[in-house]
């Protein structure tokens, strides 16, 4: 029987994160409960949406993120690029200075044409603008 540690961050009807950590599953970083769980990145303007859970293990941080979508008509694109992505990159760098970081979750970006239906028609769709693709590559080093 597989048992789970469950950590949830559900603050808004449109966003939230869930982190599951299997107990005794033979996965090095997840054999025991995390040393600590952090909700958010310490920035009130972002943390109110419940988009981030960080589990700290002895040798690694596991970050589960639900990155903001640029929204219909790209109305949240400026927020995403000028605020969230900047602060998120700083947060990941702070963690990486201490130990390895594994990023999981929904990055809300199709970074290659193969990742989206009808890429030519969707070039200005939320999550598939060239500026979003570049921002994700910059943030996560991909």
Image: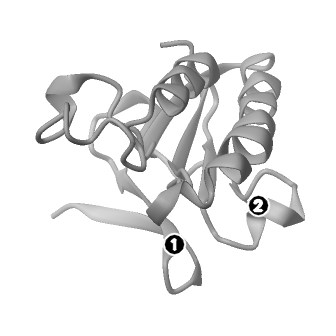
Q: Position of residue 58 (x, y in %)?
A: 64, 30
Q: Position of residue 97 (x, y in %)?
A: 80, 16
The residue labelled by disc 1 is 15
Relative to residue 1, is residue 118 depicted above or below? above
Left or right: 102 in relation to 89? left
Q: Position of residue 22 (x, y in %)?
A: 34, 53
Q: Viewer-proximal residue, 129 or 14?
A: 129
Q: Viewer-proximal residue, 39 or 109?
A: 109
Dividing the picture into quadrants, the one containing residue 122 is: top left
Task: Give me the residue at 61% from left, 17% from top.
Answer: 138
Dividing the picture into quadrants, the one containing residue 9 is: bottom right
Is residue 96 visible in this depiction of the protein? yes
- Disc on res. 114: none
Regarding mark 2 in the picture, which secondary structure is present there? helix
Relative to residue 92, is residue 4 depicted above or below? below
Q: Is the N terminus in the top left, top right, bottom left or bottom right quadrant?
A: bottom left
Q: Are marks 2 and 1 in contact (CB under 8 Å)?
A: no
Q: Residues within 10 Å of mark 1 (few under 14, many from 20)?
A: some
Q: CA distance from mark 2 to mark 1?
A: 11 Å
Task: Give me the residue at 40% from left, 28% from top.
Answer: 28
The residue labelled by disc 2 is 46
Q: Viewer-proximal residue, 40 or 60?
A: 40
Left or right: 123 in relation to 48? left
């Amino acid at each position: 029987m597989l048992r789970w540690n469950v950590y949830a961050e559900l603050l808004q009807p449109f966003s939230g994160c869930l982190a599951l950590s299997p107990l005794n599953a033979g996965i090095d970083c997840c054999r025991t409960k995390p040393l600590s769980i952090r909700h958010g990145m310490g920035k009130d303007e972002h943390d109110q949406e419940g988009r981030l859970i960080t589990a700290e293990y002895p040798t690694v941080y596991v970050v589960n993120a639900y990155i903001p979508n640029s929204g219909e008509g790209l109305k949240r694109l400026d927020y995403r690029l000028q605020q969230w992505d900047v602060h998120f990159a700083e947060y990941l760098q702070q963690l990486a200075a201490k130990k390895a970081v594994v990023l999981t979750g929904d990055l809300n970006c199709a970074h290659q044409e193969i990742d989206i239906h009808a890429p030519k028609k969707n070039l200005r769709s939320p999550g598939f603008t060239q500026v979003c693709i570049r921002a994700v590559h910059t943030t996560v080093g991909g």
